Amino acid sequence: MSSDQDVVDRAAASDAAFRRGLEFLSEVVPDLDEKMDRAIPANPDLQRLVVEFIYGSLHPRPQLDSREREIVALSVITALGGDLAMRAHVELGYRCGLDREQVLEIILHAAAYAGFPRALSASAVALEVLDELEAGD
């Protein structure tokens, strides 16, 4: 059975991870609040878990840099599908140093493992986001 102090310590760790995640995302993504509200408007608990776990706990680990983490994310999202996640990670990858050719090459390479229908969908979403990002530069 957990003590009251254990509960307090876990809550503090959770809050610290959430703050780290927000700090990372705020540095990389302009107008973060607006994008988060659009991405998960009706589920703030899910939004908090995503920020806390992925960006507050996984991203700070030293074994991979942010660019390398986005290569992994884009590969996995290509395999699993998910336009919302693909849009977010194309932008994050771009802002972490991936260029258009690299994003499209990641998707092409993933096609060999994930299948062409997934890669075609991922490419369509990626091109749309990249066009928007490059028009804003």
Image (tube, rainbow, N blue to C red):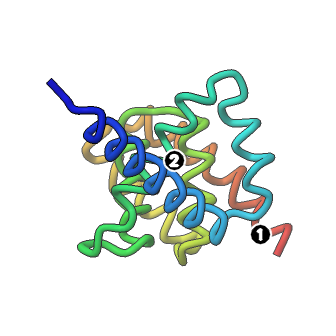
Q: Residue at x 32, y 47 (%)?
A: 9
Q: Which residue is drawn at 54% across and 57% down?
A: 19
Q: Give how far across and how far down residue 58 sits, in percent.
A: 34, 57
Which amino acid type is marked by label 2? Val
Q: Residue at x 72, y 28 (%)?
A: 41
Q: Which mark is residue 116?
A: none
- Frontmost of labels 2 and 1 is 2
Left or right: 95 in relation to 110: right
Q: Which element type, helix, strand or loop, lies under badge 1?
A: helix
Q: Which residue is drawn at 54% across and 41% down?
A: 85
- Could you tell me which quadrant the N terminus lies in? top left
Categorize mark 1 by other alpha carbons within 10 Å: few (<14), some (14-19), many (20+): few
Earlier sequence position, callout 2 versus callout 1:
2
Q: Give how far across and how far down residue 76 sits, in percent.
A: 35, 45
Q: Looking at the picture, tell me which residue is in the foreground, 47 or 28.
A: 47
Q: Which element type, helix, strand or loop, lies under badge 2?
A: helix
**What residue does disc 2 label?**
51
Which amino acid type is marked by label 1? Glu
Left or right: 44 in relation to 13: right
Q: Which residue lies furthest to the left in this view?
A: 1
- Could you tell me which quadrant the C terminus lies in? bottom right
**What residue does disc 1 label?**
134
